[in-house]
Structure formats: structure tokens, C-alpha cells
């Protein structure tokens, strides 16, 4: 099961932190690896091309200059981001076997955290309203992300032997009526809808202003 990550496109559109040869080279290599793993030619990937240009400009001392010729590549990155919104990588990562696969495990660590933070954001929770932990038996095995706040508990895991990807309940689950519920990996393809479902099931009011999601 192949998947593509949107991380390289988002990073290519905001490369301000890439100011050293080491950071530019790492970003370029990571982007090329992600593109190749997704089945694309790295040489034709817009994010890879933008990173290559940034590395070249760093060598020439031209980072501070305007580069309008990057416009078409930036537009291509935005188009790819729009496409990937409908097929987020986390869905494939939760469904496929990723144990003992370092690159997939690295992607799961990043995308799993982002998915749960997006759900929390949709529920109106600020970063200070919950704790997010990652627990794994060892570095070679996919672990569980656990998010716990005053009103919600969520656990995100890869789907093994038919197990659900997401388990959620009210934090005080032993109270009468606080049922443990589950959602499949496919539900994370539409996180706003999933968050609304969780809010209804757990009777969470989502009416207050929300923090800015970074």
C-alpha cells in the first residue's frame, strides 16, 4: 500500500528555517526519498526542485533575494497539497504493516501526532488542554499515540488483526453512559467530520473560539 506525504510540500513553501548547508541537504534528501517512496520521480517533484534551488542559492549567497521564477513550482506544491487533503498519508500508515520499517515508522510518528492534534483543534482544545504521548515497546515497533484531556481520551494505533485505529471515550469512562467507542483508519480522511462525531458521542460542546493551529 503506497502513500504520499504532504510534509515536503509544506516545508518547501516555508523554507525560512533552512539556512545552513546541512539543513538544506537534509531537506532535499528527505524530500527525494519521500517522492521516490510514493512512486514519483524525484527529479520532477516540485518540492525537490525548490529545495535544490534553495541549496544552490545558499551556495551563491542569494537567499535574501526575491525569486519570482519559483512561482510555478510553488503553485504545483499548493496543488499537490490540495490533492493530498483527500487522501492523507495517516490512513495508509494505519492500515499497512509498518513494523521494522524505519521510514514508515518515522512518517507514522509525525503524521499520527498531527492527526490527533487536528482532532483536538476541531474539538476546540488548546495545546494546554491536553497531554499527547507516544508509547512504543521498542523503536522498531509502531506504538500508540495517547491524547488525554479533561473531557476526552483518545488512542491512535495501527490496525492489527482487525483492531480499530482510533479508540475514544470520555476521560471519566467509568461513569454510567460513558461508552468506549472506535473509529476505523478511513475516518481520518475527514478529520472535521470525525471530530463532530466524537463531540456528539462524548457530549462535548464545541462553541468557544479555537486557537490557531500551527
Image (tube, rainbow, N blue to C red):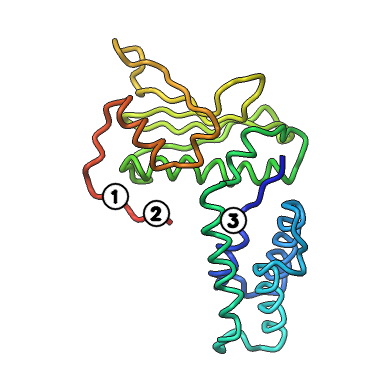
Question: Tags 2 and 1 in contact by the CB under 8 Å rule?
Answer: yes
Q: CA distance from mark 2 to mark 3?
A: 16 Å
Relative horizontal placement of residue 145, taking residue 104 as reference (left or right): left
Residue 210 is tagged as 1
Question: Tags 2 and 3 in contact by the CB under 8 Å rule?
Answer: no
> Residue beneath label 2, please?
213
The residue under the point 72% across, 35% down is 98
The residue under the point 56% across, 86% down is 68
Quadrant placement of the C terminus = bottom left
Q: Is residue 47 above or below residue 187?
A: below
Nearer to me, 65 or 137: 65
Residue 95 is tagged as none
Image coordinates of residue 175 in percent, x first then y, are 30, 12
Quadrant placement of the N terminus = top right
The residue under the point 69% across, 34% down is 96
Q: Is residue 191 above or below residue 38?
A: above
Image coordinates of residue 69 in percent, x first then y, are 60, 85
Nearer to me, 151 or 201: 201
The residue under the point 76% across, 64% down is 42
Q: Badge 3: few (under 14), some or many (20 or more) residues near its Cα, within 10 Å?
A: many
Q: Is residue 36 above or below residue 44?
A: above
Relative horizontal placement of residue 16, taking residue 203 as reference (left or right): right
Instruction: Say which quarter of the image contains residue 191.
Output: top left
Image coordinates of residue 11 in percent, x first then y, are 58, 64
> Residue beneath label 3, please?
6
Q: Nearer the viewer, mark 2 or mark 3?
A: 3
Amino acid at each position: 500500500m503506497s502513500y504520499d506525504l504532504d510534509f515536503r510540500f509544506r516545508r518547501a513553501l516555508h523554507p525560512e528555517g533552512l539556512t545552513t548547508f546541512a539543513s538544506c541537504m537534509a531537506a532535499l534528501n528527505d524530500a527525494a526519498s519521500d517522492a521516490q517512496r510514493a512512486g514519483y520521480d524525484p527529479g520532477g517533484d516540485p518540492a525537490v526542485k525548490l529545495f535544490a534551488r534553495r541549496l544552490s542559492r545558499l551556495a551563491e549567497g542569494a537567499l535574501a533575494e526575491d525569486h519570482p521564477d519559483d512561482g510555478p513550482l510553488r503553485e504545483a506544491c499548493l496543488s499537490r497539497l490540495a490533492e493530498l487533503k483527500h487522501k492523507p498519508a495517516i490512513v495508509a500508515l494505519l492500515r499497512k504493516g509498518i513494523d521494522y520499517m524505519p521510514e514508515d515508522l518515522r512518517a507514522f510518528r509525525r503524521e499520527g501526532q498531527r492527526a490527533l492534534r487536528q482532532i483536538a483543534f476541531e474539538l476546540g482544545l488548546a495545546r494546554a488542554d491536553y497531554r499527547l504521548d507516544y508509547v512504543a515497546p521498542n523503536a522498531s515497533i509502531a506504538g500508540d499515540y495517547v491524547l488525554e484531556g479533561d473531557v476526552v481520551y483518545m488512542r491512535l494505533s495501527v490496525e492489527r488483526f482487525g483492531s480499530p485505529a482510533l479508540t475514544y471515550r470520555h476521560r471519566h469512562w467509568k461513569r454510567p453512559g460513558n461508552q468506549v467507542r472506535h473509529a476505523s483508519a478511513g475516518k481520518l480522511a475527514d478529520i472535521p467530520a470525525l471530530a463532530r462525531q466524537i463531540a456528539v458521542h462524548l457530549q462535548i460542546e464545541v462553541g468557544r473560539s479555537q486557537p490557531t493551529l500551527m
